[in-house]
Image (spheres, rainbow, N blue to C red):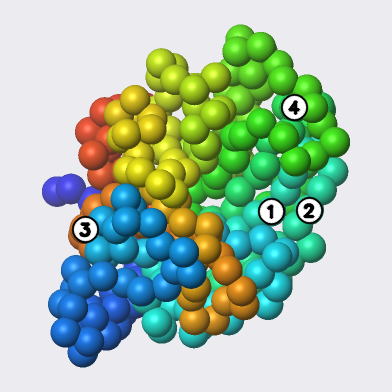
Amino acid sequence: MARAFRLPASVSALLRNAVMGLAVTALAACATGGGLYGAIPGDNRPHKAVDRARTMPVQGIDVARYQENVDFVRARETGTHFVFMKATEGKDYVDPNFRANWQRARDAGMPRGAYHFMTWCSLASEQANWFVQNVPADPSALPPVLDLEWNNHSSCKSKPNKADALEKIRLMLDVMERHTGKLPIIYTDMNFHRDILAGEYFPNTFWLRSTAAEPHERYENRPWTFWQYTQTGVVPGVRGEVDRNVFYGSTNDWLMFLSTGCDPRAIAALAPTGRCQFAK
């Protein structure tokens, strides 16, 4: 007889809250006449080219210290289904709001994940160790995220060549996966993707920034799981503007992602490697 899988209590609670959150969104949309797939408001400067993102059912945000004290309960109750939060940067920076955000989102029943902003002026091994030291390996968390961009707005102006950058990236991804037990997500923008990632295979889920076009138009049809579609979002519970994101699929796809940490479309290919397993 096949052995039944039993989810840890923390993961089971997360799934229950996710189902409740999706139901609340459906009821709110129906109450406004939009139905489950009615447009979701909340953008100070909406761009018509990304309108489809606002009609998709699984919506989320990403936050850092700039959003200050986020009310995750209110955000979840008004249709935000997940949050990614900045945790670390480089080899020695921790976002000052990370620990509070991490705990408050958990307490609110909001699925949450941590991201590391990669810098190009310190060793990947140093950055990987810093991430491990500061981000808990929580089985109820979303997979960790590696944020890959050029450091144009920092004092670090170094730009490694493609081979060097890819070596650093793969080391970082490997350590993050071993630490958390989940295949990391790669976040990137158009410039970094064009210069370094285009044409390269990764088993990882991609989270793509595209605020004036759909991702397939800007990323050479790179498959994506998360899409950051605006940086001028307005969300109940969040002070000021916030990045808004959407998950690619249906509510059932989202529950599968929460259960396995993998894009459901990739599970068949990744499962033989030991990834994407339901928590036991």
- Residue 40: percent from left, percent from top: 31, 72
Marks 3 and 2, how far apart at CA:
34 Å
Which residue is located at x 40 percent, y 82 percent?
A: 78
Question: Is disc 3 surrounded by few (<14), some (14 to 19) or many (20+) residues within 10 Å?
Answer: few
Side of 25 relative to 115 (left or right): left
Residue 122, which numbered label?
Answer: none
- Residue 31: percent from left, percent from top: 21, 89
Residue 222 drawn above or below residue 75: above
In the rendered image, which residue does mark 2 sit on? 94
First-in-chain label (1 vs 2): 1
In the rendered image, which residue does mark 4 sit on? 120
First-in-chain label (3 vs 4): 4
Which residue is located at x 66 percent, y 69 percent?
A: 67
Q: Say what amino acid the circle numbered 3 marks.
A: Ser
Residue 87, which numbered label?
Answer: 1
| Disc 4 element | loop
* Nearer mark to the viewer, of 3 and 4: 4
Cβ atoms under marks 1 and 3 closer than 8 Å? no
Q: Say what amino acid the circle numbered 1 marks.
A: Ala
| Disc 2 element | strand
Q: Name the quadrant containing residue 6.
A: bottom left
In the rendered image, which residue does mark 3 sit on? 250
